[in-house]
Image (cartoon, rainbow, N blue to C red):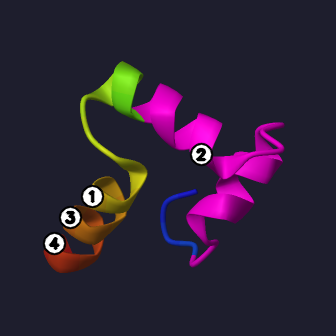
Amino acid sequence: MIGTRLPISGVARKWGFAWSGEFARLYLQTFGEKPFDTVRRYRVSI
């Protein structure tokens, strides 16, 4: 996924999540940050 501009909802759908809120909840639980924060940090660093 690195280098793509796929929206977070698109990533959630790609991984089988019908509801992006559930994806975000599990992402936060797993990685300790919201998906948006990861995307924002990545975009700032490039």
Q: How far apart are labels 1 and 2 at the CA level?
A: 15 Å
**Which residue does the image show at 80% across and 50% down from the upper left?**
13
Q: Which mark is residue 45?
A: 4
Q: Residue 21 carries which label?
A: 2
Residue 12, position in %: x, y? 69, 48
Label 4 close to label 3 by CB (< 8 Å): yes
- What type is the residue that disc 2 sits on? Gly
Reply above or below: 43 against 11.
below
Of tags 3 and 1, which is closer to the observer? 1
Which circle's residue, 4 or 2, is located before the other in the chain?
Answer: 2
Specify start and end residues of the magenta stretch as a single range.
5-27
Task: Determine if the magenta segment contains residue 10.
Answer: yes
Crowd class of label 3 (few under 14; some 14 to 19; many from 20; radius 10 Å): few
**SS assignment for the magenta stretch, majority:** helix
Which circle's residue, 2 or 3, is located before the other in the chain?
Answer: 2
Which residue is at the front of the view, 46 or 35? 35
Reply above or below: 24 against 6.
above
Crowd class of label 1 (few under 14; some 14 to 19; many from 20; radius 10 Å): few
Residue 45, position in %: x, y? 16, 72
Q: Name the residue under label 3.
A: 41
Q: Mark 1 points at which residue?
A: 37
Q: Which mark is residue 26?
A: none
Give the farthest residue toward the left.
45
Of tags 1 and 2, which is closer to the observer? 2
Crowd class of label 2 (few under 14; some 14 to 19; many from 20; radius 10 Å): few
- What type is the residue that disc 1 sits on? Asp
